[in-house]
Amino acid sequence: MAVIEAQGIRKTFGTTVALDGVDLRIEEGRIVGMIGPNGAGKTTALNAILGLTPYDGQLTVLGRDPWTARAELMRDVAYIADVAVLPRWIRVAQLLDYAGGVHPRFDRAKADAFLARTAIRSNAKVRELSKGMVTQLHLALAMAVDARLLVLDEPTIGLDILYRKRFYDSLLNDYFDQGRTILVTTHQVDEIQDVLTDFVFINRGRITFGSSMEQFESRYLEVVVRPDRIAEARALRPIHERQGLGRSILLVDLQDGGADRQQLAALGEVRKPGIADLFVAMMEAQGTTP
Amino acid sequence: MNTGTIVWSVRRELWENRSIYLAPLIVAGVIALASVGAVRHNLQPDKLASHDELVAGVLMGTTLLVAIFYCLDALYGERRDRSILFWKSMPVSDWTAVLSKMAVPMIVLPVVTFVLTIVTQLIMLLAASAYLSMHGRSAAALWQLPWLQMTSGMLYHLITVHSLYYAPIFGWLLLVSAWAKRIPFLWAFLPLAAIGVIEKIVFNTTTFVSMLGSRISGGMEGSGAKGGMMMLWPSQPFEFLTRPGLWIGLALAAICVAGAVRLRRYRDPI
């Protein structure tokens, strides 16, 4: 069974179309990145999935309709929003008490163990914590919930590099297993590329592309070409070209371009491309550079 | 919806809004201190009884003010600071959330008022008794006041007026709190004032304003409450239940709460 199954999700705010027919299927045990420019509809899509906003179209999350069954759904879903949403007046201990009180799948010992590794004191108020600590606290809460789906909307925005790395380390080492699914949006695509198993591109309220990381890595290659070989390389119809250190860096689609790995290796250094580069290439091809 | 979730939801309201118990506690503390200092004014039974009633009235006024400001912020503040996104990430329904907020003015505050009033009255009684016995006089007359009747009368008044009769007021304030994007205080009171003014200009009547006044005074006018609210019980315990005003008010409160639940579901953070 798919964890998330969406067909033709539409959502408008007045005359603005936020979601223009989103089709999305996410299987259990995947870590899926949702990548798109600002205003592409990422947060609106997540809000629909979390039952925070009504929509038109078919959507089931863990077999439930999120809009009509939010409270039930939240027993199996943990969520960290793109902004600090923990109430600023609450004490850490109160927050844990409350979560333990209302959430049947909240494991207090797990949250305590996670927090013991941080500098967060249990009698501190959320407003007294630094931005990084608030994110750690929210992550501790989310990870202490035995959830089947974890939704992260720009979870590391505004955090320094050290926190960001720790965040994803904890996520992978302490939390993720085959029974869980993670859906994450972020601007720092390069940072999570190694974490993801799948990704989708979203633009102008539509899912424009989706792939597993294996498919992506076997289909796309990047080749670094010296100026004297550039004409030969361009004949292979790269989908994108950028400049770097006196070389041209070409992104090639092995499936549609007709080139193979050996041809490319003859032209220059072949390497694994970044999702971000594919994203830029596709955006430019559509004439919608963010 | 289960009881545990409701209890934790109400508890979290008390964590956030400590004025629910701190404001009446401070008022009660000041009165208790003053009553010890000015104990000589409480030595006659009739004086003590009237001061007891005054204490109840002041504390009821205090908790009513607390209730009004609490309700206006209850569903507005969580949208303004975006913490609603956190509350909604917990398996707590919008009905549970709104009903637990409604429980604060309808149940928690009357209980706080009742307990603090009794404790304050007891302190006044003990202080006066101690003063009398220190001066070699008998305090028996003070203890022969109809305490049980006074206390049950106050309880009756709290349940009927402060909880049931005021329910539509709290419901309306919660509804505005769930709806307003700015300054819920103005949105709560200006429309009511406008209706009153328009009615006066167009029809030259004051039905709406006197309706509001009757609601706030607890519908006490003409009900023979001459002996003060504490003497109500048990003269006509069921008269109140047969008033149409009570049931119309409760129906309005239910509509407002249902509206607030719906708004909480639909409204985005501000």
Image (cartoon, rainbow, N blue to C red):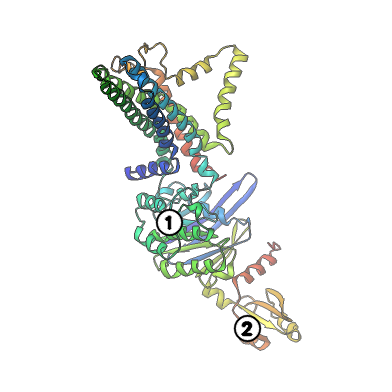
Q: Residues within 10 Å of mark 1 (few under 14, many from 20)?
A: many
Q: Quadrant of the N terminus of chain A?
A: bottom left
For the residue pair B163 and A275, the one nearer the viewer reads as B163
Relative to B141, is A23 on the left or the right? right
Q: Amino acid at mark 2?
A: Val
Which of the labelled discs sits on residue A77, or is there none? 1
Mark 2 vs mark 1: give the one in front: 1
Q: Secondary structure at mark 2?
A: strand
Chain of the residue displaying label 2: A
Badge 2 or badge 1: first in the primary sequence: 1
Q: Amino acid at mark 1?
A: Val
Q: Residue at x 63, y 44 (%)?
A: A14
Percent across and percent down for residue A172 are 45, 69
Residue receiving disc 2:
A270
Q: Secondary structure at mark 1?
A: strand
Q: Residue at x 62, y 69 (%)?
A: A276
- Disc 2 and disc 1 in contact, CB within 8 angstroms: no
**Image quadrant where residue B20 sits:** top left
For the residue pair A232 and A269, the one nearer the viewer reads as A269
**Image quadrant where residue A227 sits:** bottom right
The lab-note entry on whether marks 2 and 1 share a chain reads: yes
Res. B202 in view:
yes
Res. B241 in view:
no
Q: CA distance from mark 2 to mark 1?
A: 41 Å
Percent across and percent down for residue A62 are 42, 57
Residue B214 vs A287, above or below: the answer is above
Percent across and percent down for residue B158 are 36, 25
Residue B16 vs A83, above or below: the answer is above
Percent across and percent down for residue B113 are 37, 30
Q: Quadrant of the C terminus of chain A?
A: bottom right
